[in-house]
């Protein structure tokens, strides 16, 4: 899950903020941090979440590919599980 704070920091790594309940409407901008519009924060959050979801999906694809290759080498499911956990 990509949080509001993670999204803000992706836009401005030097931002100092407090967020209540991970709610974009409950951001307190601290230490003269420039305010970032809510729609920009939410767009970044969607972008980061999509990237995270894509990475998870790619990891699943890579794992399945590796398992298929190990099976093609003659390993059985128990042997493969012992290797990859």
Image (tube, helix red, strand yellow):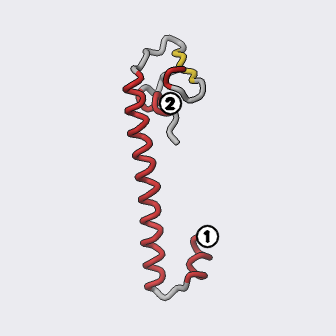
Q: Disc 1 or 2, which lies upstream in sequence?
A: 2
Q: Is residue 54 above or below residue 69?
A: above
Residue projecting furthest to the top: 32
Residue 58 circle label:
none
Residue 2 place in picture, x, y as percent:
50, 39
Quarter assignment of residue 79? bottom right
Mark 2 lies on residue: 4
Neighbor class of circle 1 (other Cα within 10 Å; few <14, some 14-19, many 20+) is few
Q: Name above or below for residue 72 compared with residue 64.
A: below
Q: Nearer the viewer, mark 1 or mark 2?
A: 2
Kindly identify which residue carries mark 1. 85
- The residue sitting at 39% across, 20% down in the picture is 37
Q: Tell me if residue 51 comes above or below residue 69 in the rendering.
A: above
Q: Position of residue 51 (x, y in %)?
A: 40, 46
Q: How far is mark 1 from mark 2, CA to CA?
A: 34 Å
Q: Residue 65 at x, y = what percent?
A: 42, 72
Going by the image, does 28 lie left or right of 41?
right
């Amino acid at each position: 899950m990509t949080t509001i704070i993670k999204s803000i920091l992706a836009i401005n790594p030097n931002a100092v903020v407090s967020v209540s309940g991970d709610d974009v409407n409950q951001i307190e901008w601290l230490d003269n941090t420039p305010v970032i519009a809510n729609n920009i924060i939410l767009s970044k959050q969607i972008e980061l979440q999509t990237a995270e979801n894509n990475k998870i999906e790619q990891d699943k694809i890579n794992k399945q590919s590796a398992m298929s290759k190990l099976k093609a080498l003659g390993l059985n499911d128990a042997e493969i599980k012992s290797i990859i956990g």
